[in-house]
């Protein structure tokens, strides 16, 4: 996956974003939240696959929570609420009292 994510040959941003999300999710599932953040941010900043933004920001917020960077988690959470006010992920995020204080 890592080699694929560095490739410039993808014409469909969503295909590339899906590969990168799979890689980021694998890091996340292995509790390697810092590497997961690198690849989640790559989807946002490099690939710009808007279809993945809602999920990706949700995972970014969770990564920041897992590494106890509450300030960044809250900042991204507030942006998330504004950008995705009807998100299916808001209910889960709102359950975290740290974010809603």
Image: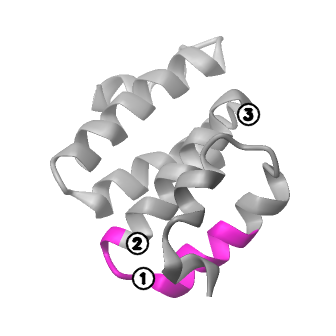
Left or right: 17 with respect to 12? left
Q: CA distance from mark 3 to mark 2?
A: 23 Å
Contact flag, marks 2 and 1 (Cβ < 8 Å): yes
Which quadrant, please, contains the C terminus? bottom right
Q: Earlier in the sequence, mark 3 or mark 2?
A: 3
Instruction: Tell me where the magenta segment starts and ends, as one range.
Output: 66-78
Q: Secondary structure at mark 1?
A: loop
Which percent across, then down, holds residue 79? 75, 66
Tell me, for residue 4, which label it has, or none. Answer: none
Q: Residue at x 62, y 33 (%)?
A: 52
Choose top left, top right, bottom left or bottom right for residue 75.
bottom right
Which quadrant, please, contains the N terminus? top left
Q: Residues within 10 Å of mark 1 (few under 14, many from 20)?
A: few
Placement of 8 over or under 46, stated as above or below: above
Choose top left, top right, bottom left or bottom right for residue 83.
bottom right
- Between circles 3 and 1, the one closer to the viewer is 1
Placement of 42 over or under 6, stated as above or below: below
Q: Residues within 10 Å of mark 2 (few under 14, many from 20)?
A: some
Q: Residue at x 41, y 57 (%)?
A: 37
Q: Earlier in the sequence, mark 3 or mark 1?
A: 3
Residue 50 lies in the magenta-colored region: no
Residue underneath mark 2: 65
Q: CA distance from mark 3 to mark 1?
A: 25 Å
Q: CA distance from mark 2 to mark 1?
A: 6 Å
Q: Secondary structure at mark 2?
A: helix
Foreground of the two, 1 or 57: 57
Tell me, for residue 50, which label it has, or none. Answer: 3
Residue underneath mark 1: 69
Residue 67 lies in the magenta-colored region: yes
Q: Main secondary structure of the magenta part?
A: helix
Which percent across, then down, holds residue 92? 53, 54
């Amino acid at each position: 996956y890592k080699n694929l994510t560095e490739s410039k040959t993808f014409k469909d941003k969503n295909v590339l974003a899906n590969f990168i999300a799979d890689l980021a999710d694998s890091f996340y599932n292995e509790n390697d939240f810092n590497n997961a953040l690198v690849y989640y941010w790559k989807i946002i900043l490099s690939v710009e696959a808007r279809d993945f933004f809602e999920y990706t920001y949700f995972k970014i917020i969770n990564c920041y929570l897992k590494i106890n960077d509450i300030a960044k988690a809250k900042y991204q959470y507030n942006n998330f609420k504004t950008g995705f006010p009807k998100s299916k992920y808001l209910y889960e995020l709102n359950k975290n009292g740290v974010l809603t204080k």
